[in-house]
Image (cartoon, rainbow, N blue to C red):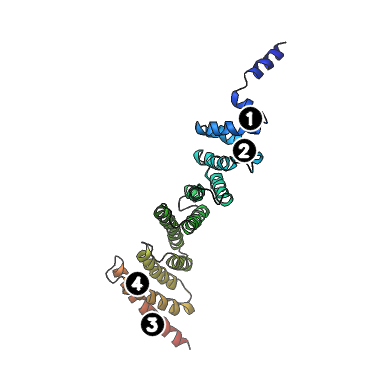
Amino acid sequence: MLCCAVLFIGGSCKSEFEKIRVSGNPDLLLKSAFKYYEAKKYQKAQTLFELVLSNVKGRTDAEKASLQYAYTHYYLKQYLLGAYYFKNFSNTYVNSPEREEAAYLSAYCNYLLSPTPRLDQGATLTAIDEFQTFVNLFPQSKRIEECNGLIDELRRKLEEKAFNEGQLYYNLRQYQSAVISFDNLLKDYPESPDVERVRYLISKALYRLSENSIVDKKQERYTEAAKRSEEFLLKYPDGKYSKEVREIKKDSQKAAKASKKQSNSKT
């Protein structure tokens, strides 16, 4: 008897939301999802949208439901899914007046997923690609300036990661890898504010690489260190690192001559 009473009480106390959730009534589910969304009860709205979206395809309110479903992920900070559903909306409802905003939010969700420079930058690259796609699709959008600013911010993060990788190689005395990494940075981000320091570190790394090379490689590598030092001095004759780079150039030229003389004496 007690067990039955407990079951009866539990059943009678079922919340309004639970009654709606298990009703199986598409109209009630959708109407309630809209209601919970407007009340900013996004978790409940999301749960109901998930139950009903597949049943409302082709209906006039399907577009609204799909967009609000995407927004529930955004408001609940579920940015990975938010990016997916905003992009899906943008690709599905190409004539919707909300398409532009959905496309922007898809990119913006990936922007919010972009981690610190020391971590993998997959989301950063995706965000840059989607912001660029947005700019191409909506060239008259009021968000163009904002998108370009966010692209610059994300690219700076990639630059910082690339610089940190080169610096790490240098600190580990893997000088050849450091030079390759820094050269790739110059190629990919020629306008980086770190360019002067990068060119300085290339000269320094090449000099260190030359010092630690086998005899047969020394002349070639010292010559390259002197050449890159000269390139630095042409660009930054009065730069922060110019005095040190002049010393690297001088020592590299001297060492290259000595290495050549040593090689000639062996032949």
SS state under label 4: helix
Q: Position of residue 246 (x, y in %)?
A: 31, 73
Whether tag 2 and tag 4 are in contact, CB under 8 A, the answer is no
Q: Nearer the viewer, mark 2 or mark 4?
A: 2
SS state under label 1: helix
Q: Which mark is residue 21?
A: 1
Q: Earlier in the sequence, mark 2 or mark 3?
A: 2
Q: Which residue in the protein does label 2 denote?
A: 50
- Residue 53, by quadrant, is top right
Q: Amino acid at mark 4?
A: Phe
Say whether residue 51 is left or right of residue 203. right
Whether tag 3 and tag 1 are in contact, CB under 8 A, the answer is no
Q: In the displayed image of the protein, which residue is found farthest to the top?
A: 1
Q: Which mark is residue 257?
A: 3
Q: Earlier in the sequence, mark 3 or mark 1?
A: 1
Q: Amino acid at mark 2?
A: Glu
Q: Position of residue 141 (x, y in %)?
A: 43, 53
Q: Amino acid at mark 3?
A: Lys
Q: Nearer the viewer, residue 40 or 167?
A: 40
Q: Position of residue 155 (x, y in %)?
A: 44, 58
Q: Nearer the viewer, residue 150 or 102?
A: 102
Q: Earlier in the sequence, mark 2 or mark 4?
A: 2
Q: Nearer the viewer, mark 4 or mark 3?
A: 4
Q: Amino acid at mark 1?
A: Arg
Q: Earlier in the sequence, mark 1 or mark 4?
A: 1
Q: Position of residue 84 (x, y in %)?
A: 57, 48
